[in-house]
Image (tube, rainbow, N blue to C red):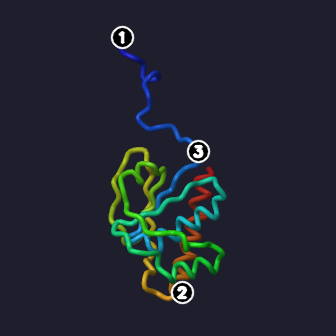
Amino acid sequence: MVPSPASQPSAVPSPVGPPTVLFVGAHDAATSQMAAALLTTRAGGRVRALSAGSAPAVRVDPAAVAAMAEVGVDLTARFPKPLTADAVHLSDVVVVLGGAQPCPLLPGTRYLDWPVEDPTGRDVAGVRPVRDELDRRVRGLLTELAD
């Protein structure tokens, strides 16, 4: 007897808990860190945010840390992490930020491409417009995820 499709286990696990968004930057030192922190702050526990880099830096960019502190978001305990297939697998949405290498493509995962400039190496004044653009995009993503 062949089981009916309704009795077959799903290949994609059912979501448990809040959705997870992975932000991928080239170095996980500025844009991806800022976006993940902004999402965490704005979501209030409704969404889990991760960040990773295709070629992670040694530390989070100091100007990014300072620019985020201006809006009450603390990046001092954050550190760059490598992009892994496991991180992608755990994520419902993967946001690839300008300059990052492509991610592993997995079925059931939504991929977004945000062409945001990497402000690494700029002073705080140069990071602010990127921070504000990321904040605008994060708020939009939160609205989409709530639908």
Q: What element does badge 2 sit on?
A: helix
Seen in the picture, residue 110 relative to 5 is either above or below; the reply is: below
The residue singled out by tag 1 in the image is 1
Residues at discs 3 and 2 in contact (Cβ within 8 Å)? no
Q: Which residue is drawn at 41% across and 35% down?
A: 11
Q: What element does badge 3 sit on?
A: loop
Residues at discs 2 and 1 in contact (Cβ within 8 Å)? no
Q: Nearer the viewer, residue 16 or 142?
A: 16
The residue singled out by tag 3 in the image is 17
The residue singled out by tag 2 in the image is 124
**Along the polypeptide, which appears first: circle 2 or circle 1?**
1
Q: What element does badge 1 sit on?
A: loop
> For the view shown, which residue lies furthest in the top direction?
1
Question: What is the CA distance from the residue labelled 3 to the residue labelled 1?
Answer: 36 Å
Amino acid under disc 3: Gly
Indicate the position of residue 119 as horizontal and vertical percent values. Answer: 45, 81
